[in-house]
Amino acid sequence: MIQNQNLTEAPNLALVEKISNFLDSKFRIPGTKLKFGWDPLIGLIPGIGDFAGFIISAILMLYLTRYGASRKVVIVMSLNILLDAMIGTVPFIGSLFDFGFKANKRNIELLKEHYYEGKHQGNGNGIILTIMLALIGLFALLLFSIFKFVSFIIHIF
């Protein structure tokens, strides 16, 4: 049941959901119900893959917050993206995590609750810039740390 009175202001969730499915659920492992998308696959490219997934998720979040997502939704979406990006940088384990966590699908569910069920109401526009800058800074620091660690290991051998 649609409870939110501002559906004319709601974003095109069909487009965002299509992108989310592309990243998290595009393919199915034959003979199982297990699905995965491009996010864990591009995450296999060291450094660049996880950063690309992070950027795509962040752009989706920015798009959706322009339509008045509440602070709670913005914060939980940011935490989903940050957790996905940070754990995703760990070789092999990160790809397994991406396979199961599906941050983009989680964020779509939050948005459906917000826009169609009337949950998590309010406006998150004021907090989004701070969160995004913090996320980008933390992710850059993590990538820099991994680069330094790999450089150190290479010099040892």
Image: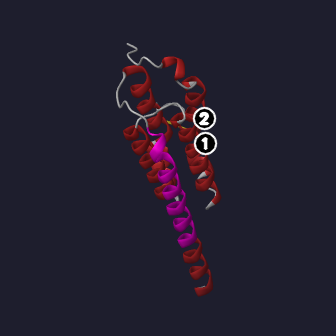
Q: Earlier in the sequence, mark 2 or mark 1?
A: 2
**Can you identify the residue that label 2 sits on?**
22
Residue 47: image quadrant is bottom right
Q: Where does residue 21 sit, x and y in percent of width and height? A: 56, 32
The disc at residue 88 is none
Specify the segment rendered in magenta: 124-146
- Asked if the residues shown at circle 2 and circle 1 are in contact, with their CB atoms under 8 angstroms apart, the answer is yes
**Can you identify the residue that label 1 sits on?**
38
**What residue is drawn where x is 37% and y is 30%?**
121
Residue 93 or residue 131, whichever sits in front: 131
Question: Alpha carbon of mark 2 to alpha carbon of mark 1: how far?
Answer: 6 Å
Q: Residues within 10 Å of mark 1 (few under 14, many from 20)?
A: some
Q: Where does residue 118 sit, x and y in percent of width and height? A: 36, 23
> In the displayed image of the protein, which residue is found farthest to the bottom?
156
Instruction: Describe the element under mark 1 as helix, strand or loop.
Output: helix
Hey, what amino acid is under mark 1?
Answer: Trp
> In the displayed image of the protein, which residue is found farthest to the top?
1
Residue 92 or residue 43, whichever sits in front: 43
Left or right of residue 99, residue 47 in this image:
right
- Can residue 51 be seen in this snapshot? yes
> In the displayed image of the protein, which residue is found farthest to the front?
126
Residue 1: image quadrant is top left
